[in-house]
Image (spheres, rainbow, N blue to C red):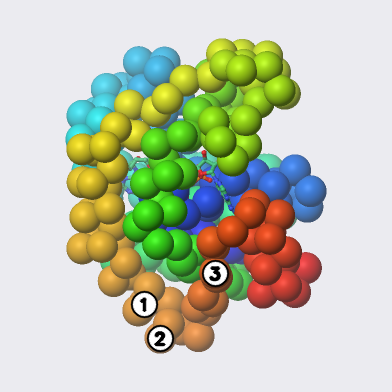
């Protein structure tokens, strides 16, 4: 199965994609996580992407398409894949369709995580992420057992650079103007599924599983 998780920053895409990866053996391809790893490691990709990510702008399409094409060729992408944060523009959606077609694959569902702006702000301002593997927490909604440290690997938790209020506003604007219109591409192909992503994580997970029939 190939899924695309669509939705605004803080919609809960990463949280639910990681759950599907852990429970159902699907591979999460989070372009945001890949970029953050490269930025932390100071690779050429990381140096190119850093300014865009910190300003809340989109990294250029050709960079993102190349990155995803490379990731999709690896053997662990042969089973199920959850795309989290890709595609974000029409050229990215078209490029993904072509790459999948070349491998005789196609997207099964595009899930649109729908949340209010108030929820987005509360989720993003309290988000903490682990340094070692990007495990996701929230100071109020999903606190770690030991404050400041990851339950799974014990590494320190940090606040993402782009989770500051002014950058959150810019990311929301970019989402509305550049990314949300891509949903029409998938509506036209009959792949669109709306998901009420408000409420507790387990409630959202139950709705998601029901929508996917898994
Ligand atoms: P990316 O990392 O993809 O960020 P995003 O799309 O803005 O999404 P987020 O990671 O902020 O939110 P999420 O929906 O995954 O929420 P999460 O599960 O963490 O992209 C970052 C940047 O990289 C972009 O701005 C851009 O610069 C660049 N980039 C990436 N992909 C690109 C592309 N394709 N093209 C160009 N540029 C690209 O949850 C948020 C918080 O809420 C957490 O604390 C979590 O614990 C909590 N939470 C989750 N669900 C619930 C719930 N149901 N109830 C209560 N709390 C919850």
- Mark 2 and mark 1 residues within 8 Å of each other at the beta carbon: yes
Q: Quadrant of residue 39?
A: top left
Residue pictured at 64% horizontal, 44% vertical: 18
- The residue pinned by badge 1 equals 185
Disc 3 target residue: 196
Give the mark toward the camera: 3 or 1.
3
Question: In the rendered image, which quarter contains the N terminus?
Answer: bottom right
Q: Residue at x 54, y 69 (%)?
A: 196
Identify the secondary structure beneath mark 2. loop
Percent coordinates x, y for residue 42 in the rendering? 35, 15
Q: How far is disc 2 from disc 1 in space, using C-alphas?
A: 5 Å
Say which quarter of the image contains residue 53: top left
Q: Which residue is mark 2?
A: 188
Label 3: how many Cα within 10 Å (few below 14, some 14–19, many 20+): some
Residue at the spot x=40%, y=62% of the render? Answer: 116
**Mark 1, secondary structure of its residue:** helix
Residue at (75, 43) in percent of width and height: 22
The answer to whether residue 60 is left or right of residue 115 is: left
Ligand 1 is located in which of the four quadrants? Answer: top left
Q: Secondary structure at mark 3?
A: strand
Instruction: Kindly report the distance in space between the C-alpha atoms of the residues bearing marks 3 and 1.
Output: 21 Å
Q: Which of the two residues, 105 or 184, is positioned nearer the viewer here?
A: 184
């Amino acid at each position: 199965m190939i899924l695309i998780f669509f939705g605004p920053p803080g919609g809960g895409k990463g949280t639910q994609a990681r759950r599907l990866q852990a429970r159902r053996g699907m591979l999460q391809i989070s372009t945001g996580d890949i970029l953050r790893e490269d930025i932390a490691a100071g690779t050429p990709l990381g140096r190119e992407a850093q300014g865009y990510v910190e300003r809340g702008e989109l990294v250029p399409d050709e960079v993102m398409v190349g990155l995803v094409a490379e990731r999709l060729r690896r053997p662990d992408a042969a089973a199920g894949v959850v795309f989290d944060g890709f595609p974000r523009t029409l050229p990215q959606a078209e490029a993904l369709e072509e790459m999948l077609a070349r491998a005789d694959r196609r997207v099964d569902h595009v899930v649109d995580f729908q949340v209010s702006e108030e929820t987005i702000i509360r989720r993003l301002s309290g988000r903490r992420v682990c340094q070692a593997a990007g495990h996701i927490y929230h100071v109020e909604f999903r606190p770690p057992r030991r404050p400041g440290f990851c339950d799974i690997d014990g590494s320190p938790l940090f606040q993402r650079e782009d989770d500051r209020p002014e950058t959150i506003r810019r990311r929301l604007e970019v989402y509305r103007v550049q990314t949300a219109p891509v949903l029409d591409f998938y509506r036209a192909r009959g792949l669109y599924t709306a998901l009420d992503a408000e409420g507790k994580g387990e409630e959202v997970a139950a709705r998601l599983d029901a929508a996917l029939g898994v």
